[in-house]
Image (tube, grey):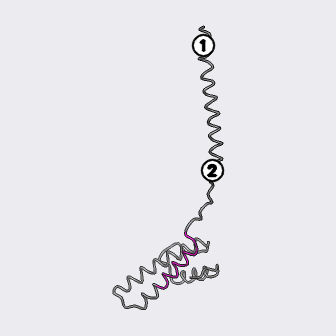
Amino acid sequence: MAWVFVALLLVVPVLLIKAAADLGSGLDRLDAGWRRLHRREPEPAGQPVQKIAADLHRLSQHLEHVDRSDLPAKAFRLRAATLAYDGVLLDAARTLEVPAPDEVPMHSLDRLQTEAALAQQGLVW
């Protein structure tokens, strides 16, 4: 009778380890199947080009409005609007992989060259 107890002590742990290994591989297969069924398309980095173009249009209109106005703190407003415009312009350049300077505020010539390069890529704002 003792030999049956010893045999069980030796066999049961081996069977438990094998069952755990089989369960683990089964769970891996189940997880892989789940991922295949619920696969998501990768989302593009950054904002959509249409939103960037709309932001550039809005900010360029705002810059023109501030430039033509006689509002208080006009210089401050122009500076803030220019910084916002330059930031979105650099976002557009990164999105469309157009070379542009990394600094904001941009120099006038750099801004003009970046706008021309974006226009050559077909961006309209």
- Residue 100 in sight in this render: no
Q: Which residue position holds label 1?
A: 6
Q: Which residue position holds label 2?
A: 35
Residue 70 drawn above or below residue 93: below
Q: Position of residue 121 (x, y in %)?
A: 64, 78
Secondary-structure class at tag 1: helix
Q: Is residue 51 magenta?
A: yes
Q: Nearer the viewer, residue 33 or 89?
A: 33
Q: Residue at x 62, y 45 (%)?
A: 31
Mark 2 belongs to which amino acid?
A: Arg
Q: Residue at x 37, y 86 (%)?
A: 74
Q: Disc number at residue 88?
A: none
Secondary-structure class at tag 2: helix
Question: In which quadrant is the C terminus drawn?
Answer: bottom right
Q: Position of residue 48 (x, y in %)?
A: 57, 71
Mark 1 belongs to which amino acid?
A: Val
Kindly report the secondary structure that dominates the magenta region of the rendered protein: helix
Q: Position of residue 67 (x, y in %)?
A: 43, 89
Which residue lies most toward the top here? 1
Which corner quadrant of the image does residue 112 belong to? bottom right
Residue 121 drawn above or below residue 27: below
Q: Residue at x 61, y 28 (%)?
A: 17
- Residue 65 in sight in this render: yes
Q: Nearer the viewer, residue 23 or 60?
A: 23
Callout 2: few (<14), some (14-19), or many (20+) C-alpha neighbours within 10 Å?
few
Give the mark, 1 or 2, whose residue is nearer the N terminus: 1
Q: CA distance from mark 1 to mark 2?
A: 44 Å
Stretch in magenta = 47-61
